[in-house]
């Protein structure tokens, strides 16, 4: 395939009989339509395939660029080290490799910022870090962000993307579901707004806790959302599931989410919802 040939080229390698260098890492293949896309073109199109409209997953930094007003984001100074409660030999090595690859310390970033001038507490998860799995650090950071929203009397925005609880941390990772849920109960009692934004995919313990507890739940088009995967459910109940099951469109039709919002409109929709709530 052409994409494999591109990847194998050396940085200065040239095609035979050609004078043009083909840079490495400048192209990406769309999972949906299989088109080869120039990365810069994809970035300029909000990480959406210009051919078929498929939504690519986003790095935390890119999501912040699109949603938060420039220069307003302030990350919470919360330095927590990820532990290895099950003493899995490969786990620390995997974490180290992912940190070098993604430039992230963990699967979520939390802080304060402004969205069209409206000050918020915002958390953004990243699928590139262990599929956005929720371990102890992720649960603690989100809980801390909720507590800061209560303290500062600010709306809370969480962008979720996750495969669920982090199996490398065992039952301790499952406890984060109860912890984040309890914190959100206090946020609700304080009368503060919580907008949950579901992106592709949002599964497992994240869906079963904070991602589903928003006062308003938004989702990006065609995002896959659920607890267990479709294959697991079919094997469990012994029945075929309806077409489009677990897509954002299916969930909107059945009342699980409030609105599907295109990526280009998310910033304005969120800021408008905050203004409506203030009034």
Image (cartoon, helix red, strand yellow):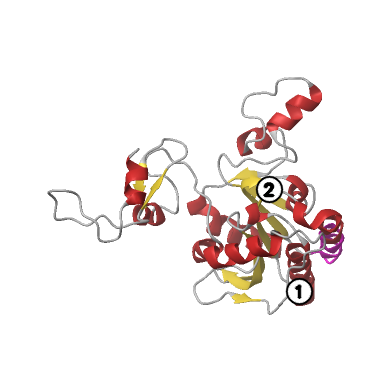
Check the picture and name the quadrant holding the N terminus: top left
Residue 142 among magenta residues:
no
| Towards the viewer: 52 or 95 | 95
Q: Is residue 75 visible?
A: yes
The residue shown at (32%, 45%) is 5
The residue shown at (74%, 47%) is 207
- Picture quarter containing residue 228? top right
Question: Does 19 sit left or right of 222 as displayed?
Answer: left
| Towards the viewer: 3 or 226 | 3
Question: How far from the left and from the top, in percent, is residue 110?
Answer: 66, 69
Q: Which residue is mark 1?
A: 148
Residue located farthest toward the bottom when viewing the structure as drawn: 77
Q: Which residue is mark 2?
A: 163
Specify which label sits upstream in the sequence, 2 or 1. Answer: 1
Q: Which region is colored magenta?
A: 180-191
Q: Is 53 placed above or below 155 here? A: above
- Picture quarter containing residue 256? top right
Which secondary structure, mark 2?
loop
| Towards the viewer: 258 or 92 | 92
């Amino acid at each position: 395939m052409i994409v494999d040939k591109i990847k194998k080229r050396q940085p200065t390698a040239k095609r035979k009989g050609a004078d043009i260098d083909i840079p490495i890492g400048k192209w990406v293949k769309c999972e949906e339509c299989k088109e080869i896309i120039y990365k810069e073109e994809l970035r300029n199109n909000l990480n959406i395939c210009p051919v078929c409209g498929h939504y690519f997953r986003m790095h935390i930094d890119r999501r912040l660029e699109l949603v938060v007003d420039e220069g307003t984001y302030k990350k919470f100074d919360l330095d927590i080290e990820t532990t290895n409660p099950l003493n899995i030999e490969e786990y620390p090595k995997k974490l180290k490799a992912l940190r070098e690859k993604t430039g992230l310390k963990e699967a979520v970033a939390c802080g304060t910022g402004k969205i069209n001038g409206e000050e918020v507490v915002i958390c953004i998860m990243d699928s590139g870090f262990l599929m956005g799995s929720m371990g102890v650090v992720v649960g603690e950071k989100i809980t801390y962000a909720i507590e800061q929203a209560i303290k500062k009397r600010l709306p809370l925005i969480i962008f979720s993307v996750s495969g669920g609880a982090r199996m490398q941390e065992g039952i301790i990772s499952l406890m984060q579901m109860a912890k984040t849920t309890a914190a959100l109960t206090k946020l609700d009692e304080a009368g503060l707004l919580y907008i949950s934004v579901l992106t592709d995919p949002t599964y497992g313990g994240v869906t079963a806790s904070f991602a589903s507890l928003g006062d308003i739940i938004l989702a990006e088009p065609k995002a896959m959302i659920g607890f267990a995967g479709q294959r697991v459910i079919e094997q469990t109940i012994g029945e075929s599931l309806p077409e489009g099951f677990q897509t954002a469109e299916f969930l909107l039709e059945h009342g699980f989410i409030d609105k599907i919002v295109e990526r280009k409109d998310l910033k304005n929709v969120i800021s408008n919802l905050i203004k409506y709530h203030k009034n």
